[in-house]
Image (cartoon, grey):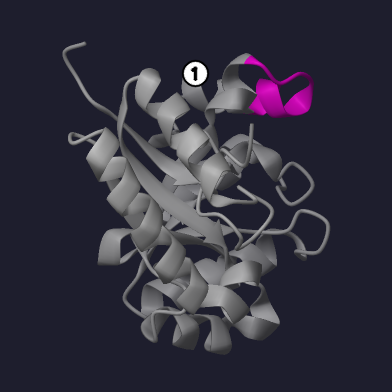
Amino acid sequence: MNHELIDIHTHIVYGIDDGAPNYEESLRLIGMEYDQGVRGIFCTSHSFGMAHQHEEYYKNLEKIKCAAEAMYPDLSLYEGCEVLCEKYDMPETIQRIKNGVFPTLNRTRYILTEFDPYVTGGMEEVRYCLEYIFDEGYIPVIAHAERYRAIYDDPLDDVTWMKKLGCLIQINLFSVKQDTGWRKELANEFLKHHLDDLVGTDTHMM
């Protein structure tokens, strides 16, 4: 292998959200990633878990980091959070980012940003949230962009607009190869038109 892989989107910190349920599972997932050539893992627990368990997140992350570094000296784990953005809640969301409750990607200005396709009020709400994030000095990384068919007016046009605004676009590896139906179709359309910037596993559990 002549290059290193970095997984930008995972839920491997145990006991925080709907990802790894325990310490042992976290280490199993880390081992699987390492065996597939991954040498950097962003630990991006959902904001719904971080809102009330961010102290536990940092404690559990440190615990699995220590174990992972002992087993795999060339592997790095980074903090992060998959931040759900909704128009009504943006001031509190940004405040939680500033306070470290919702950590940015490795303490940079980049925020892994997601929307709820069943709740978000179309691209008007997406635009409001993204512009709000930029106005606060952060850069959105759009999590699993292929999942928002119900939000988009036109997927290619809307993702192109997000990139022109300055967002980075992440798609899930599972959607590209193993998924079926419209998620796979959209993921591969984004790849075909060079609209993707990052790929993540969105790993939750075995």
Q: Note whether 60 is above or below 169 in the view shown.
A: below
Query: Which quadrant, please, contains the C terminus?
Result: top right
Query: Which quadrant, please, contains the N terminus?
Result: top left
- State the image coordinates of residue 108 (x, y, percent, origin top left): 26, 64
Residue 196 located within the stretch drawn in magenta:
no
Instruction: Assign a secondary structure to mark 1.
Output: helix
- State the image coordinates of residue 43 (x, y, percent, origin top left): 43, 52
Q: Name the residue beneath numbered marker 1.
A: 192
| Left or right: residue 160 compared with residue 154 | left
Q: Note whether 83 is above or below 91 in the view shown.
A: above
Q: Residue sitting at 79 percent across and 21 percent down?
A: 181
**Residue furthest top in the image:** 1
**Residue furthest right in the image:** 118
Amino acid under disc 1? Lys
The local crowd at label 1, few if under 14, some if 14 to 19, many if 20 or more residues have their Cα within 10 Å, is few
Q: Residue sitting at 49 percent across and 23 percent down?
A: 191
Q: Residue sitting at 65 percent across and 51 percent down?
A: 21
| Left or right: residue 119 compared with residue 77 | right
Q: Note whether 33 is above or below 12 in the view shown.
A: above
As rendered, which of 9 and 94 lies closer to the eye?
9
- State the image coordinates of residue 49 (x, y, percent, origin top left): 63, 69
Residue 180 located within the stretch drawn in magenta:
yes
- State the image coordinates of residue 38 (x, y, percent, origin top left): 33, 28
The span picked out in magenta is 178-186
